[in-house]
Amino acid sequence: MTAALLTLLLAATLAGAASCRDAPAEPLPIRIATGSPTAVYYAFGQSLAAILNRELPDVRASVVVTAASAENVRLVGSGSAELGFTQADVLPTTTADSPTVDAVARVYDDQLHLVTTAGGPVRTVADLRGRRVSVGAPGSGTEITAIRLLEVAGLGGDGVRQERLGLDDSVTALRAGRIDAFFFSGGLPVRGIKELAGRSATRIVDLGEWVEPLRARYGQVYVSRDIPRSAYGVDPVTTVANPNYLIVQADLPERLVREVTRLLMERRAELGAAHPAAGRMSPRSAIATAPLSLHPGAAAWYRAAKP
């Protein structure tokens, strides 16, 4: 009886060990650092996560709500997120300064919005002097670009009464009269701004004259772009724009990043349905990610695709 029992126990142990060996591996978590739920990064990230979950069975993708660009770079660089979106002007000026982060693609351009009430006194940047202005959430790309613009316009320091609010809080504060204007940088159209313009009379201030001063002081990343009437139903303006990148942990496996890059490019129509800005990508423009290097997996896909 003892020998028979030992045989049964050994068989059970071996079966259990085989079962453990054969058990499927846990899906690899892919956290995508985005931004405000009413801004472009979040819509883009949600759609990308759905595509990755559907088409990569070994991946479990999810989005992370953040203050946007600067926080996203920090999260990806520290390993707290695998992917993230950022404005180019947030990045260090050389790849050597950010060895833990690579690029997957240049995805679209952000336009800087200066939003106020249509009947209010703010018609130009100079009209911001002494007024209450939200320059964006701490850790956002908006904050960096807005503060740079105020500096070149001679309104740095205490030139305006700065508030640091995200998009949703900025919209609420403007409607309540707690601020006079707010900055927000995003791809067209920004849902939160579009909803604001649909509910109350809104003005977007022209920033075109500040493109060249920004380029002269901070580099060629800034370009001039138009915000047409069709975006928000308000008077068209010219503004400051800079590129957005999808970034990735530099040590993520090459094969995985190659698949992410493939789906990013091949599912552009689906991503564009989530937000028009996401549909403006192309393999040819996606590879322009200076100062970041493309991740080897992304570079391999672009070489094979020959954009």
Image (spheres, rainbow, N blue to C red):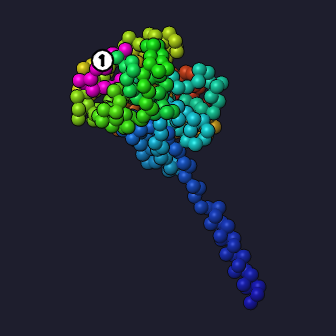
Give the left or right position of residue 249, taking residue 120 as reference.
Answer: right
Element class at badge 1: loop
Task: Return the residue at label 1.
Answer: 123
Task: Answer with the quarter of the image where residue 237 lies.
Answer: top left
Residue 180, given in percent of the width and then of the height, sits at 33, 27
The residue at 26%/31% (across/down) is: 197
The residue sitting at the bottom extreme is 1
190 w.r.t. 150: above or below: below
Magenta stretch contains residue 116: yes
Magenta stretch contains residue 241: no
**Residue type (three-letter) at the residue carrying disc 1:** Arg
Judging depth in this view, the residue of 9 and 247 nearest the camera is 247
The residue at 52%/12% (across/down) is: 217
Judging depth in this view, the residue of 196 and 257 nearest the camera is 196
From this viewpoint, is residue 306 visible? Answer: no
Q: Which quarter of the figure is the N terminus placed in?
A: bottom right
From this viewpoint, is residue 215 visible? Answer: yes
Count of marks, rendered view: 1
Judging depth in this view, the residue of 122 and 30 nearest the camera is 122
Residue 27, given in percent of the width and then of the height, sits at 55, 52
Give the left or right position of residue 71, taking residue 180 as reference.
Answer: right
Task: Answer with the quarter of the image where residue 250 lies.
Answer: top right
> Mark 1 packing: few (<14 Cα in 10 Å), some, or many (20+)?
some
Magenta residues, as a range? 114-126
